[in-house]
Amino acid sequence: MRTYSVSLKQWVKILSLVSAKSNVFAPVKRYDFLDYELLSVNNVDYISFNKAKPTTPLKAFFFPIKENVVKERKELQQVIFGVPSCDLNALNLLDKIFLDEDFLDIYYKNKRENTILIGSDCYDIDENCHCTSYGINPFPQKNCDISFSLINHKVILQVHTKKGEGFLNEFTADFIELDKLPIEIHKERENTVKQLELQNKDLPGNEETRKAIQKEGTVIWKKYAKDCVSCGACAVICPTCHCFLLIDKANFEKVKIWDACQYPAFERVAGDEDPLEKIYTRLKNRYLCKFVHKPDMFNEIACTGCGRCIDACIGKINKNQLIIESCKLRKEHD
Amino acid sequence: MTEKNIYKPLKYKIDKIVSETPLIKTFFISAAKEFEFKTGQFVEVTIDEIGEAPYTPSSSPYVKNKMELTIMKAGYVTGKMHELQGGEKIGIRGPFGKGYPVDKFYGKEIIILGGGVGLAPLRCLILTLLEEEDKFEKINICFGAKTPSDFIYKDWFSDLKKHKNVELLRSVDKADADWKESEGVVTVLLDKIRTDFKEVIAIVCGPPIMMKFGAKRLLELGVKEENIYLSMETNMSCGLGKCGHCAMDSIFVCKDGPVFTYKEIKNTSEMIEFRSLFEKKS
């Protein structure tokens, strides 16, 4: 894995140069919100570096909110800079679903292939960040082409893939190649891990969570479902939620649009049978899907600990609180 | 070479439409390109601009230049299907899912239990089995309907009776003056079969509640869990194991099914809930 050092000024110049010919997205903070913006001369000086996750989950770039999936189209190359580790880990599951050899989704595949992913270390954390609870480190280790850290005003780039190497190729003449990551990066990473562990010291890991919610009858679900208004925010903001609806348009065209199992009638069939008719069954389904069903089906956990569902819930349902309570209840029962 | 687009339907023409009952019609579709499917697999049918829904063909997979779909008016898309006149173009994606593992049935006695429009996929299965009739010990067909006039494929029954390897039994929930066969829920027909139930293959298809009671009775008679085949009815939308609508615990019914053995699905929350009804009552 090649490692380079370059000045921040030079790196911003590179992003700027690339943005003239490809779409480059980078996190920019506006008021309290950090989110990806299409880079241009207007915002290139406002990029945030090594912060916790942007509001929009990475999936939106490969699995857009709505997309015509019958019309043919050519995907343009895009660069997504500043992707946090939680979102990169979400690709493990999404790739297994959309790149499934039996039924390959060419729209997803073309976007994945035409995207350069530049991951970045998280050097601060949000209130609800908890990736480490589920064995994910707050710095990119996989699913990205290049990873980025800004340490002491120096940019450190690590190349993970050939695609990443190819992307940097025309710029590396000005880079300094390092034989290893600077020690300061390891210190920063350790520091973030410590912060996360402290913030989530009461939160059980995914295995304990799995066991507890599997045994949970209805008490917890009914209690927390009182605050659920079926808005589906938890699903749309989730980096791994992949459910969609196909909407029919004229000339046999179809539009794939994000759906959510929290919406009423999600599983309803003709004749009005609906296994998820009640709100609490839908809430339960969400948690079982994340911690039991998806691990069983794909050997991947479907929660990367990004905490967005807690941030987004308008009923203020705190997923972690729900899990802590379930695990506590289970210990009392056993 | 461009890769196949899994979301894009191919267009076919509806040749004619036949009314089976006031709520059920059979659609005859001709193929410019041959239809390839296995019995028990389903297709997703699109009505342009309206919507898409899953159906299992009711015609034989051995007939490749046409396909028949028997559809009950039960919701929005099926309602729109029933408004078609014939001659229209529809879109078809598929086939999807795993079919019935017919080769596992060789040498065995078979019981087919069907109710209402559940006879549609079973007709496809029976036509498939009859192609190699000698390979099966015996084929018991138990069909049920609400009333005698609610049976679909009324002309087909006399054909079935001609096969010496086939035993056709029928029941209706409510008989009329002319009805000479059994009366009662379809499971009453199982009591007429004299066989070693431990060795039979049983295939059930019908409304969800009939399927569950059918499975329950077959188990009581001694049919092995791994020899009972059920067709699960869920909201199969994409057919590809992606959209999530048909998820039943850790199963995508569209991709992993829709045909499952009782053994495969007995521990899903839906089946556990069904069993709990009796555990409480007894």
Image (cartoon, rainbow, N blue to C red):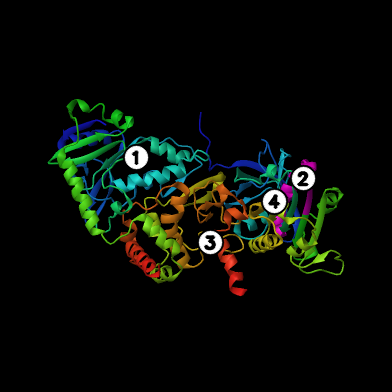
B68 or A21, which lies in front?
Answer: B68
**Label 3 vs label 2: CA separation?**
34 Å
- Say which amino acid is labelled 2: Phe
**Label 3 vs label 1: CA separation?**
35 Å
Q: Choose the circle earlier in sequence order: 4 or 2.
A: 4
Estimate how packed mark 2 is, as few (under 14), some (14 to 19) or many (20 or more) residues with alpha carbons within 10 Å: some
Q: Chain of mark 4?
A: B
What span is in magenta?
Answer: B115-140
Q: Choose the circle earlier in sequence order: 3 or 2.
A: 2
**Quadrant location, the N terminus of chain A:** top left
**Quick check: A268 left or right of B148?**
left
Tell whether label 1 touches label 3 (CB within 8 Å): no
Of circles 3 and 1, the one toward us is 3
**Label 1 vs label 4: CA separation?**
44 Å
Residue at the spot of label 3: B269
**Label 3 vs label 4: CA separation?**
25 Å
Q: Main secondary structure of the magenta part?
A: helix
Q: Which mark is residue B136?
A: 2
Q: Choose the circle earlier in sequence order: 3 or 4.
A: 4
Task: Give the secondary structure at mark 2.
Answer: loop
- Say which amino acid is labelled 3: Ser
